[in-house]
Amino acid sequence: MTEAGETSPRRAGLWLILLVTIAVQVLATFTTLSLAAIAPDVAAGIGVSPELVGFQVSLIYLGAAVMSTVAGFQLRRWGPIRVSQASLMFCTVGAGLAVVPSVAVIAVGSLIIGFGYGMTNPAASELLLRLMPPERRNLIFSIKQTGVPIGGVLAGLTAPTISQTFGWQWAPAVAAISCFLLVLLMQPLRAVWDADRDPTARFSENPFDAMTMVWQSRPLRWLSISGFFYAAVQLSLATFVVTLLVSDTDFSLVEAGAVLAVVQAAGVVGRVGWGWVADRLGNGLVVLLIMGGACITGALLVMAVSEAWSTVAIYLLFTLFGLNALGWTGVFQVEAARYAPQGELGSVIGGITAPTYGGVIVGPAVFSLVFISVGAYTTTFALVALFALLGMLALALVGRAAARDPNVSAQF
């Protein structure tokens, strides 16, 4: 077969897998954020305070962090397509439980949703690595990561409307049904894309090797710490923007949901745009530092938001904030790949996202606790600025650590 003949199927396979991985992340993220997008309605329905949504989101990412630590074993035993299907089934079950109007049952459902969400990134990275051209790695990984803000857009646009039209329980119900349907649609892909799995792999054989690889590499260790703080920025914004606008600026729930959708849409543009910039500059760390500085600026400006602000100004601020607070993950994963041992990208992505999910667990929960003391969502965004600053400090140490680590090998 000619080189051109080999390239065409390879390119077709890349775009098919990219489409599938984006679809998985869209629905997993929609499921994750569906309750946050309707927090005031859920709180009224079960008789709790709406700021408790921070703890609900933290439970989701606690489950994600736990599941991502065993990513290497999952991929070896079942293959990336089956792992992706399993992630959607966890989301289906968790969202189904979230329909029950009980704090305890919703908490269990949130943890199960997290189990599913934690399986998405390692599987997607493993699939894309097989077909990804090195010179376009930041762009392709960033396109893959657009599934997260697209899912957020869907949550912001549809969940409030569903909630106010049919009742809040229908939002997680729609998420559960959608995830299950995608599981069925993916089944024909398994024979080809899971052909390299090892059915004899056992959990007892280094199940936590992903975490071990990250912790033993100083560049990956510092990068994971930066991911912890950047994730805290991202989820604090995504979790509280709706409640902030309803409580502090007198937006309606649907109007605030539209702003959340804009934030997530800006994240789509930011991920693709910053991925393209990183490929052109050839330096992802610089791009990540730029985004961190922009997040500090955005968080400080949010502190000044009030009812006196025009709607246009609020949309502009949160659009620019979303471009950067949600735009970092594709570039971040490529930086992780640079320091990953050869052939271990899927495991390393799982290992490095565990502390990243830790930031998501801590960020919204700490935000909720600080809000209880401060009493205003806008003022509490000073904490988000601090998260971004600490993330930038960790990033500054990544390159220095890489230069001093003789064991670092470049994946690309």
Image: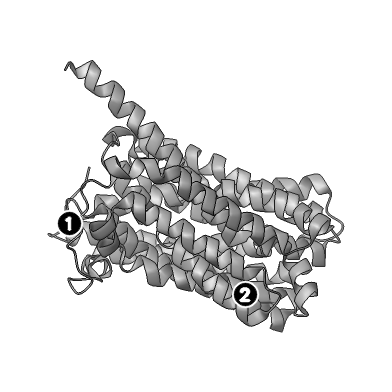
Residue at screen point 33% across, 39% down = 137
Where does the image place residue 408, in percent across and percent down from the top left? Answer: 17, 56
Residue annotated with mark 1: 408
The N terminus is located in which quarter? Answer: top left
**Separation of marks 1 and 2 at Cα, in angstroms:** 43 Å
Q: Residues within 10 Å of mark 1 (few under 14, many from 20)?
A: some
Quadrant of the image containing the C terminus: top left
Judging from the image, what secondary structure is the residue with disc 1 in? loop
- Residue 354, how many percent across, how many down? 38, 67
The mark closer to the camera, 1 or 2, is 2
Q: Residue furthest left?
A: 406
Q: In the rendered picture of this protein, how many numbered marks are placed on residues? A: 2
Tag 2, which secondary structure?
A: helix
Residue at image mark 2: 106
> Considering only order in the chain, which callout, 2 or 1, is on the residue closer to the N terminus?
2
In the shown orientation, is residue 320 left or right of residue 1? right
Instruction: Evaluate whether residue 276 shows in this view.
Output: yes
**Amino acid type of the residue tagged 1 in the rendering:** Val
